[in-house]
Image (cartoon, rainbow, N blue to C red):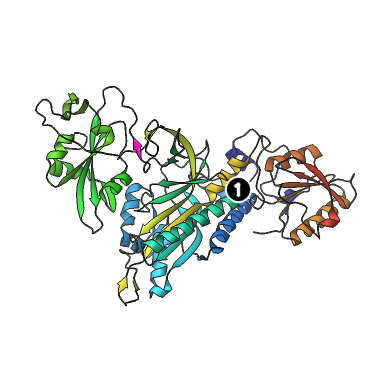
Amino acid sequence: MSTVPLYVSRLWPPVRPRTGDASATTLDLLHTLGLIARTDATGVHTLLPLGLRVHDRLTAIARNAFEERGALTFAPPTLQSRTLWDQTGRWDVYRREGALLSVTSAGGEEMCLAPTSEEIAAATVRDHLRSHRDLPVRLSLSTTKFRDELSPRGGLMRGREFTMADAYTFDTGPDTMRASVAFLNEACTAALTGMGLTGTFTAPADGGSIGAGPSTEHLVLADTGQGTIVACTHCGNRGDGAVLAAGPPPPGPDPVVNVIAFTLTLPGGATQTATVAIRSDLHVSPRKIATATGAARVDLLDPGLLPEQLGRPAGTLTPWDAAGAPDVLPLYDLSAAELETFGISDGSTGVRTGVRWSGTRALPALHPVGTDLHHATENSTCGACRQGRYRALRAVEVAHVFELGTQYATPMNLRYSDPDGRPTTPWMACSGIGITRCLQTTAELNRDRHGLRWATGTGPADVHIVVLRADQPQMRERADRLARNLAARQISVLVDDRPLPAGDKLRYARLLGLPHAAVLSPDHPDTETEVIARTSGRTTRTDLSHISEKNPFTPT
């Protein structure tokens, strides 16, 4: 992080008198105060000089959090060969999801702008890993990522181009991998706290397309959050509805049971077709299916295979079709198994009502054993205390830690020699902190009615020198002298040297929200400054001769 003083008169874009409105949204403030700028590409932003300083400081905080705990930092490329992604099968997965930005070189090589770094991290370690003595390996990085979001929104919250501070660990087995997971969670917590995100908490989560095993989200509650979690009104249990244990919410009138088909990939590589009977108002959680069945991977069954395997096209399956199909594992969500009467698909004619598990109208009796396979949602019964109900809350996912196991190391042929000389596959884990998302989130959560409010070490600078009567040479010289003195002590400074009225400059200082403002006035002796703490609003007179002995701009 540079400590070269910034001068407001030289900033680009220029800071206009009366810039910004304290009642504006945080995103609008970041734009009008000159931290970020929109571009012609949807979901892509420019970091302007003030915003880049925040970005660089947050990146340094994350890097230090991992390095202080023993990780080493490296810088892999974002432009990566398709060859790596084909080894794990994720080229096709991400293309199907529409998230992969791919390019073809002049020589015909297919490449992508990577949305994540598992493949390149594994390939980097693979080239050098030889023995169990080389493990554990713990590497951190901070790179630009690209995801072709279908609906980029919220400014920096969900963009197509963003910065992630990642870390990857490689261990000898599941126990040592879990020790690395604890290291990753500890480092993420330290980094987020250092960024001023003191309200973060952890919760179990669905690892999605990145991790096949358990994962942990680091979240902060915010009305501007792009995600939703559920929280129990009785015991406070909270987290991702895809993994939290839950009883179904009360059914509405005339409930309908749908059947969804999945392909389970088992740990040994074999596949199994499974069906889930679930109430039509709820969603199946693939993570809960994996937990219930031990599957390493759960994917929706290709709809084109449904007539062959289950005798009916998509949207017309019933629990009785699934129960009668050979080589199919029928599963029943609690929401369906607990119903007394319900409706099912009646083919092209609509819905058949009044159906019972005990059998009715040519349907034999079924005896479903219910399992929690649905996303916990608003009014679901809490699976922890069994007394409260969940309510939905908006939240921001600021970091995520994944247990990866061997799902990347095995297909990428990552091996080392164990103590007996046998080739063995290492176990991986990883984490990711959204730096650009954290920039907007910390600005949102720490602001007040006067504008932004940065924690020390996170904003564009830490001291805002407000020069009154900046048109006078002696006042500019006083400001330069103080700025040099603070910079020599590694204190970052923004100097407002514009020839504007004091009220406009003090308003701008409050709006930008640096931790301290140092007001230099011709009415005060050369050796004094008036220090205003942004958080408390407290004003004190400080003797400038003390700066060489101690920092007068301490957190308040």
Left or right: 208 as drawn, with respect to 9:
left
Residue 427 visible somewhere in the drawing:
yes
Q: Which picture quadrant has residue 485?
A: bottom right
> How far across and down, in percent of the image, does residue 64 sit?
58, 60
Left or right: 21 as drawn, with respect to 45:
right
Identify the secondary structure beneath mark 1: loop
**Is 92 part of what is drawn in magenta?**
no
> How far across and down, in percent of the image, does residue 512 sit?
68, 43
> How far across and down, in percent of the image, does residue 161 sit?
48, 50
Extreme-bottom residue of the structure: 421
Residue that mark 1 sits on: 196
Magenta stretch, main secondary structure class: loop
**Is 246 part of what is drawn in magenta?**
yes
> How far across and down, in percent of the image, does residue 194 sit?
60, 52
The residue at the point 34 percent across, 74 percent down is 418
Check disc 1 and give the amino acid type.
Gly
The residue at the point 90 percent across, 49 percent down is 525
